[in-house]
Image (cartoon, grey):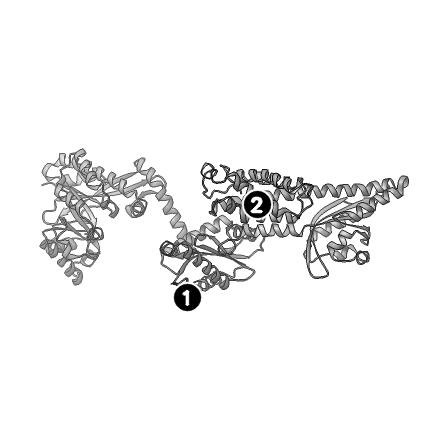
Amino acid sequence: MTGWTAPVPSAHEVTAEVNRADRRRFAAVWAQALMGTSYVPMTSAEIESRLRGYTDRLVDALLSDPFDPSPGRAIGVDLVAVHFTSAESLARTIDLIGDEILDILRLGHSPGWRGRVAALQGALCSGFVQAARKRTLDEQEAIRQAVLDARDAVEQALRTSEARFRAIFAEAAIGIGIGDMTGRILEVNDSLARMLGRSADELRHMMVQDMMHPADPESMWRTYEELVRGERDQFRVEKQFDRPDGSTIWTELIVSLVRGEDGLPLYQVAMIEDVTERRMLQERLRHQAMHDPLTALPNRALFQERLASVLQHHEPGDRIALCYMDLDGFKVINDSLGHHVGDDLLVAVARRLADAVHGEDRLVARMGGDEFVILIQNSFGTEHAIEIADTVLDALRAPIRLGGHELSVSASIGIVERPLAGQTAAELMRDADVTLYWAKSEGKGKWALFDPDRNATEVAQFRLSAKMPAALERCEFYVDYQPLIGLRDNGVVGVEALVRWAHPELGRLGPDRFIGLAEETGLIVPLGRWVLRQACQQARQWQDQFGESAPFVSVNLAVRQSRDPELVADVARILAETGLEPSRLQLELTESAVMGTADEPLDALRALSQMGVRIAIDDFGTGYSNLAYLRHLPVHELKIAGSFMEGLRDAERADPVDARIVGTLVDLAHALGLTVTAEGVETRAQARRMADIGCETGQGYLFARPGSPEEITAFIAAHQD
């Protein structure tokens, strides 16, 4: 528990609140709780005084920064040292610390304080148990030594040693039994008889083998056989016994071998301590550590323990499935209706999950927040896992009524189902988490099945996006250019800048491989700024070389770039740095990006237009434009999407519908005072048809493929008058 990291107030913030009176009051309550649980040779005042010191150490540990629960262990040892040795003393101390300390000391019940209290409980319990065990073992060793002393002194003082042995044997607090080497029980003391719920005479008519319990591991009795054969002198185990009344007790059992002078085994001596209360306390603490306090479902720790066990112990061909579940819209419910409603909702969902998915081969656990996981051992295959996921989704469809609210809740589930061989817990959880993300991205109330091909693609995309920032710093990106040709005079009117990535491992990558990733990660802004600067520098060289006949350069702006508050300042700065005339720069935005500004300020586009920069709408005709709004935009050119060119590829078999659409778009552009560029022109028939329709410029493989600055410079020179 030393890794507990939940936030708690610092020590100096709460020390003032935890005053001496609060500490004395806790010590008094503690002393009252322990009265009568153990025989302690002290007055009540002395006990309370001693517990005040323990309280100071306990509180100081609780408030320590960094937190260290180890003083709790020392307090457990000290309790045993002053004779508070009974399980009742320990149980009352643990209960008092868990139930009272935060209230009496007025520290509140935040998860951080509760976590520290749990850690101190565990440390104190550990110290107490180990000290009590050592004390018991010391007593047991003294008894064993007394048995040996009695044997060695039998010729010298038989009656004296017999009397001493009988006194120790009869009065010992732990149970003692003596048997011969055939396993016949020869003698037992009263403590053992009371412990096992049988009379001494009944036990003396039994065999050691009659004490076998169905839950005893085979290794226990193999070890016993080794002792009977004389191959070992002692062994210690934790063993349970059934009483005649049907109850069960847990014991700490030590069996020792007594040898004769010739070294041959004579007797076996069993010393048995009743540890039932201690075992129950340990099981209670373990249950608390392994279960979610809100929903009572197994928690992450128990799930991981179960998963590790399944992965370690399985047969060839066994399969496993995980259904990783997350509630849809839980945060909205939590924030709008309050955390208490959110907690009640989680409890109700947990109850439905437990009712819908049950069985020894299944485990439903709460991983934290609104995330749950279902572990399915011995899965029959993918369909089996999908069937369980559908069962869960069906169980959540009915509304949940909580405190006057009727809540409809759904969930998204990621399913991983595969053979167990070769799997690890980390791989299974990683793939389940990825698949849950797929399910949530596809809508509410759905499940998604893990797809290794899709995952490999996404991993490759992630790695590519992770390398992009360094690639930009290492200048791995470069710009190619494609001419825009006048359809009347065949001159080079403009040049579109197209970014490429010279990846050191994957080779040349087109924008379709990385522009989307750049937009998702936000790198599109610095990348777009870099492309803009490169294009303007190149356009300035053409301006210097070709003068008035130099083409403008057209640069694409992504949606995220167009909404960058620094866009206008960046363009102005780059134009000033390069000396490029603003009229020789055209910025292309997609139709959806431009129309997406219908409810947003158009100050940036207007400022750029007033600066003299041309604005073009790229891929026009593929979106859903508000045509009435289009006339108010500061746009200079429309670029008709290349998809309309396909129907005009062949002059004799041109698609009249495509021709009519293109003609309408061109007429619309001209009515708005805009020029038109036809994209994707690949045949002369397309070029002639677009010229006839009225397009001013064309762009496509018919004229030129994208090329390096040197290639495009030569192309421009060749097309000069």
Q: Secondary structure at mark 1?
A: loop
Query: The disc labelled 2 sits on which kind of residue?
Result: Gln
Nearer to us in this view, 44 or 357: 44
Looking at the image, tell me whether mark 2 or mark 1 is earlier in sequence order. 2
Q: Nearer the viewer, mark 2 or mark 1?
A: 2
Amino acid, disc 1? Ala
Badge 1: residue crowd in 10 Å (few <14, some 14–19, many ≥20)? few
Q: What is the x, y in percent for residue 156?
A: 90, 39
Q: Which residue is mark 2?
A: 121
Query: What percent of the width, then of the height, locates residue 615?
Result: 16, 46
Mark 2 touches mark 1? (CB < 8 Å):
no
Is the residue 288 above or below the residue 474 in the image? below
- For disc 1, the marked residue is 398
Q: What percent of the width, then of the height, locates residue 200?
A: 80, 56
Q: Position of residue 212 (x, y in %)?
A: 73, 56
Kind of element beneath mark 2: helix
Q: Give the Cα separation between the discs numbered 2 and 1.
A: 42 Å
Rate crowding at label 2 as few (under 14), some (14 to 19) or many (20 or more) other CA atoms within 10 Å. many
> On the picture, is 710 further left or further right than 392?
left
- What's the mark number on residue 519? none
Q: Nearer the viewer, residue 17 or 338?
A: 17
Does residue 573 lie above or below 518 as drawn?
above
Residue closest to the far right: 155
